[in-house]
Image (cartoon, rainbow, N blue to C red):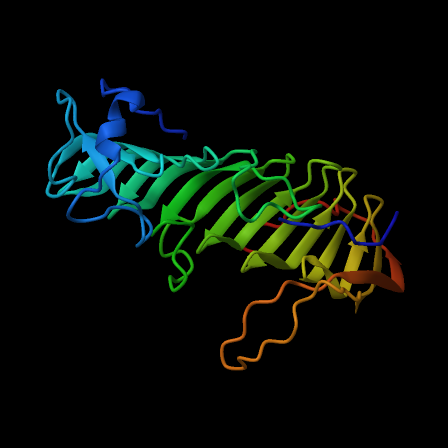
Amino acid sequence: LKLGFNKFPLLSHFPSFARKFPSVSNLQPFLRTSVPGRKMGDEDDEPKYKIFVQGRDTPLEKGSQQYTGHGRAFFVNGDTYDGTYVEGLRRGKGCYTWKKFGDSYDGQYEENKKHGFGKLTYRNVINEDDEDPPEEGAPPRGGEYIGYFHGGFRGIPENAAPGSAPSDGTFTYANGDVYVGQWKAGKKHGQGSYTYAKDKTKLIGDWDQGKITVGKWVFPNGTFYAGHFRYNKPFGEGVWVFPSGRQLTGQYVQKEQPNEDDPPPDDDEENPAPRPDPKVWCHFQCGEATAVSGGNMLSSLPDDA
């Protein structure tokens, strides 16, 4: 068994609405001008738009203001929204498509934000006009999230108490990795499991701000490591448990690797900019080996244990 640990990058569907609306090519004259009144969207700086409703060939004069019903909005940047409005706001079921990468959200809305159950799809494409192209060696873009949203983010809000609202969701990454579990403010937070497509190993445990803090590293043959984690890698005391019943205790020591690409220290001590996790080497220092017999080591404990 290789005990090194340098492999963790870590990173139902609602049908689209079919309505008879003018084609995009016929909308160009309307999209050249902005619409007065209230903007709608997840961003304060969302571009202006024109909204069409069934049975009309021209957009509503006041945009979505005070409008209730089904409509389709065309934004000047190429984005579209097809769904329900209530008193001028996106509420209920709808589908929003971003032109830049072709990403789409199909699900529930509340107060113009993704809220409730929905499906968010990230396309695995590269925009040639993007001013910030992806860095060499960066994880591939793309993936799909199916689960709950609150206030535009995956999971529950940042200040919400655990269990105060549904926060479960499944994220399937472009490389085939899958995370199933709880989310908070768009990050993995709470109970969850991350499965690596490459070797079928899993991280199962408690997550905090997108990183696992305590849990198990499970292998397909039943071997697992249980302990604490830092930077999504084992750290501190833990135990290896093998299908035979043998256990090996010890601790993982992390050593940071020098990285010339690290940003310089932040001059703002009160509000420092977030820094990326350092790259670390992990070394397991063996302790005592124990043989355990009787019962199945991999059985789940009863609920009241």
> Which residue lies at the image location 49% right of the left edge and 76% below the top edge?
271
Closer to us: 247 or 225: 225
- 106 relative to 301 in the view: left or right: left
Residue 67: image x %, image y %? Answer: 12, 38
Above or below for 221 versus 29: below
Which quarter shows the C terminus? bottom right
How many numbered circles are shown?
0
Residue 301 lies, in percent from the top left, at: 62, 50
Residue 63 image offset from top left, x and y in percent: 16, 39
Query: In the rendered image, is residue 146 in sight?
Result: yes
Q: In the depicted view, which residue is nearer to us: 304 or 45? A: 45
**Residue sitting at 22 percent across and 39 percent down?**
33
For this view, does 15 lie left or right of residue 49? right
Name the outermost residue toward the top: 20
* Residue 85 rendering spot, x and y as whole percentages: 19, 37
Report the residue at 16% width, 27% height from top: 53
Q: Left or right: where does residue 270 sit relative to residue 199?
A: left
Q: Which of 10 and 181 is in front in this view?
A: 10
Along the horizontal axis of the image, is 66 left or right of 305? left
Residue in the picture at 69% in, 50% down: 9
For the residue pair 161 and 187, the one nearer the viewer reads as 187
Where is 255 relative to 76, above or below? below
Could you tell me if residue 303 is visible in this image?
Answer: no
